[in-house]
Image (spheres, helix red, strand yellow):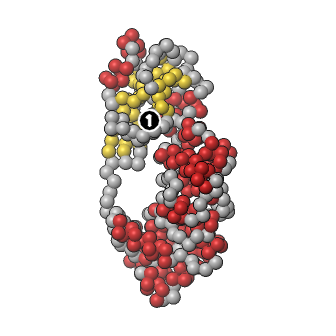
Amino acid sequence: MTVTELMEQGEAAQWSDRLLRWQSVHGRHDLPWQNTRDPYRVWLSEIMLQQTQVATVRDYYARFLQRFPDVEALAAAPLDDVLALWSGLGYYSRARNLHACAQKVVALHGGAFPRDASTLQELPGIGRSTAAAIASICFGERVAILDGNVKRVLTRALGFDGDLALTAQEKALWKLADELLPREDLDQRMPRYTQAVMDMGATVCLPRKPGCLMCPLADLCVARREGRPEAYPVKTRKLKRTAQSLWLLWARTRDGAVWLRQRPASGGADDALKSVWAGLYCLELFDSFESLQAAVPARQRDDLNELPVFKHVLTHKDLHLHPVRVELPASVTVSGQGFWHAVDAWPALGLPAPIRKLLEQG
């Protein structure tokens, strides 16, 4: 069913009404970032929720607000502090952009987030959908979000079978999303509508086994009528997964200090992980056991202890990590870029999740 057909049947206006009524009764109301129109809190939650489950974000969100209660506090903090608090949440470019965005908001906008989506999009790390979420929830702007959950709701309900791997088709879906937005009482209805479509995708219109019986749009839904909701959305371009093996030199002193090297803010062509873990503190990385061995003083090479290999899954790559532990004198310099970090100091650093877990195991 197209938007034109919905309008011809007098259903287009009901679309938002149905979603708003459903959300008021069945939507999510207890998430810590809901029931607020504070753009700092909404922005923080939107960034954290990208590619990350709600259950994981809850604790991080609370810790961030405790440490950085407002945008000024976040902007004034060292990036290392931000990365340390983000450690384990993954997709660390989000943390770097979060910090850069806070600094821009303070420097360019006096600490007040812009009130419209187009200006918000000019800030680091804020794309079109995130900008729309902030502008609609906090300021009532009539602008559509289109994250993965919302794409699923719209394509199923409308029977939109355009290939979203194609820019033209994604633009067409954006246009439809805009047309279905509320048109009256925007200051009150837009925040609730935006929350409604997010809740629908997160709790009812699931990727597999959607809860069609609980859906307020069920009688309008083309995918349900066809009996194939899991066929939507259509996206033919598949991300190619790769695999890579890396050797980690876990060097430590007798008193527990660990040798760590801060990775470049952005990777280079010779960087084994390129931009992965950029800006974080990490064990020295090598592409083979032989190259790791060569970095250790000859008299300690017989003490190298190869630990069990484990896999760390990234979005597009599987990392097969080979930790190798060795005890070295504190006078040894493993590389020109790293330093020894005391046992009571390294836990406060921004560490990749698998490195932190490894070190905590002792």
Residue 142 position, x and y percent, is 56, 72
The outermost residue toward the top is 299
Q: Is residue 295 above or below residue 165?
A: above
Q: Position of residue 137 (x, y in %)?
A: 61, 65
At a point 47% along the width and 70% down the height, the residue shown is 153
Q: Nearer the viewer, residue 72 or 82?
A: 72
Q: Is residue 144 visible?
A: yes
**Residue 82 image offset from top left, x and y in percent:** 58, 41
Answer few, some or many: residues within 10 Å of disc 1's Cα (few below 14, many 20 plus, some between 14 and 19). Answer: some
> Looking at numbered disc 1 in the image, what kind of residue is underneath it?
Pro
Q: Residue at x 41, y 45 (%)?
A: 314
- Residue 139 lies, in percent from the top left, at 62, 67
Residue 65 appears in the picture as rendered = no
Quadrant containing the N terminus in the rendered view: bottom left
Q: Residue at x 61, y 58 (%)?
A: 113
Q: How many marks?
A: 1
Q: Tell me the residue that label 1 is attached to.
A: 264
Is residue 33 rendered to the left or right of residue 319?
right
Image vertical order of residue 51 relative to residue 339, above or below = below
Closest to the observer: 163 or 313? 163
Identity of the residue drawn at 53% across and 15% down: 254
